Image (spheres, rainbow, N blue to C red):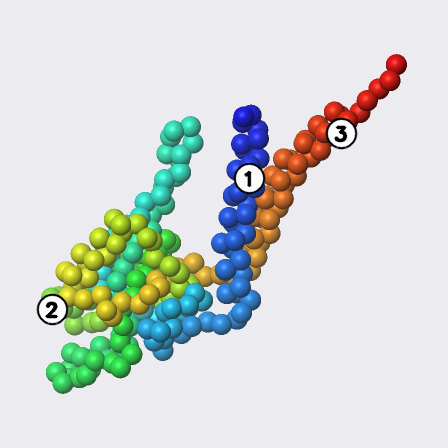
Amino acid sequence: MKKSFIYKLMAVVLGIAIVVLGMKDVKMYLSGKVLDLNTATKDDFKKECIVEGDINYVVGSFAVYEEKEKTLGITTSKRETNYYIVENLSMDYLKDLFTDEDVAEPDNYFTYVVSAGSDDMKAALDANANGWIKYFDGKTDKMPEPVHFEGKLWSEPTEKKYANYKKQALDEWGFDGSELADLKAMDSRPGKSSILVVVLGAVLALGGLAFLIVPLILGRTKKSDVEYY
């Protein structure tokens, strides 16, 4: 099998994959629906959609996913995604929690996973988690600033290694898992660029398909040409 055929086939497959995955983002963007993280319930975390709001309490980070891009066997770039456990607690509740021993747990209490790929978001989430540790240790009397988050609800990784890391973290931090939402919040908000990605994916798929089909048609045409002498 010629390498050129393999490359063309890969272009078709990659283009189709980009279109399929990108269409979900396009549908979210065109729907116009934005879920408010600060009023969301656990049931709201069952359907993929755009989310926005403030994260007030980051428990901590439990996993880092490292993705490497290689050229000729040499690593040319590296991208890391951090995973965090977050509790959906309001700042008013957190303030009452440390001034009133009898404060009741919120009715819509739940936890969820946040994945962050941008350096700014990772830094903000880390700062919030570390800020609470310092507050609990009495090193500061100031609560950390909330983290403004924009992104989407998406499925969590299915790898066994990831699941083990998450379970270890939940056990260590005193969660039984029943309060954890089905979907994660990731810092990748669908927008106009999502439409462009789908268009580029379609062009890639159609281009690869054209380069596969045209030579076959031309080949058959040549074979069918018969000359008489």
Residue drawn 56% across and 25% down?
2
Left or right: where does residue 98 sit relative to residue 180? left
Badge 3 marks a residue whose secondary structure is helix
Three-letter amino acid code at the position of disc 3:
Thr
> Which is nearer the eye, 117 or 111?
111
Decide which of tag 2 and tag 3 comes sooner along the chain: 2
Name above or below for residue 101 compared with residue 136: below
Q: Which residue is mark 2?
A: 138
| Residue 174 sits in quarter | bottom left
Q: Position of residue 156 (x, y in %)?
A: 34, 57
Three-letter amino acid code at the position of disc 2:
Gly
Tag 2: Cα neighbours inside 10 Å, few (<14), some, or many (≥20)? few
Left or right: where does residue 228 sit relative to residue 71? right
Badge 1 marks a residue whose secondary structure is helix
**Rendered-image quadrant of the C terminus:** top right
**Separation of residues labelled 1 and 3 (CA atoms):** 25 Å
Q: Position of residue 53 (x, y in %)?
A: 38, 71
Q: Position of residue 171 (x, y in %)?
A: 16, 61
> Which is nearer the eye, 122 or 8?
8
Q: Which residue is mark 1?
A: 11
Name above or below for residue 8 compared with residue 96: above
Residue drawn 32% across and 61% down?
114
Q: Position of residue 102 (x, y in %)?
A: 14, 85
Q: Which residue is mark 3?
A: 221
Decide which of tag 2 and tag 1 comes sooner along the chain: 1
